[in-house]
Image (cartoon, grey):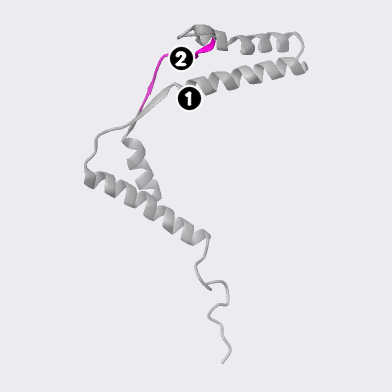
Amino acid sequence: MTTIGGYLLMNQVTVHGGYWQWSGWGGSRSFGITLIPLLFGVGILFFDGRSKVGWLLATLGAVILFAGIIANLDINFRSASLFETIVMLVLLVGGLGLVARSVFPVGNSGPGANDREP
């Protein structure tokens, strides 16, 4: 149930990428400036592979790059009827409830729970 509900819900979502909008130094499209730490870090690592500064700059540049990509995504929910939306959400939440019930047993249902002495 969880898998089907999650699939149906995710199938209704559209994701669009936009222009890189980083507001540093007054530029509206300054994707290139965010590549500078990554490029310097890679250059330093090619010179000395054990350089801590090179690893720091390369890691920082990759984090800035991926954060900028994720921050500039537009995520929209496509039109769906109320019935379709309710079916998707009931399947997803009902399935999550069943999974939670199997992971966290309710009441005294452990091994030997029904083995009472008279």
Q: Residue furthest bottom?
A: 118
Q: Is residue 18 magenta?
A: yes
Q: Secondary structure at mark 2?
A: loop
Q: How far is mark 2 from mark 1, CA to CA?
A: 11 Å
Q: Which residues are magenta?
A: 15-24
**Residue hosting label 2:** 21
* Residue drawn at point x = 72 percent, y = 10 percent: 44
Q: Amino acid at mark 2?
A: Gln
* Residue 2 to residue 79: above or below: below
* Residue drawn at point x = 49 percent, y = 61 percent: 102
In percent of width and height, residue 69 lies at: 48, 21
Left or right of 46 on screen, residue 106? left
* Residue 71 to residue 33: above or below: below
**Residue hosting label 1:** 70
Q: Is residue 113 magenta?
A: no
Look at the image and tell me in which quarter the C terminus lies: bottom right
Type of secondary structure dominating the magenta stretch: loop
Q: Residue furthest front?
A: 26
In percent of width and height, residue 40 lies at: 66, 9
In percent of width and height, residue 21 lies at: 46, 14
Left or right of 99 on screen, residue 55? right
Mark before the other along the chain sequence, 2 or 1: 2
Q: Amino acid at mark 1?
A: Ile
* Residue drawn at point x = 61 percent, y = 17 percent: 61
Q: Secondary structure at mark 1?
A: helix
Residue 26 vs residue 112, the one in the foreground: 26
* Residue 1 to residue 101: above or below: above
Report which quarter residue 41 is drawn in.
top right
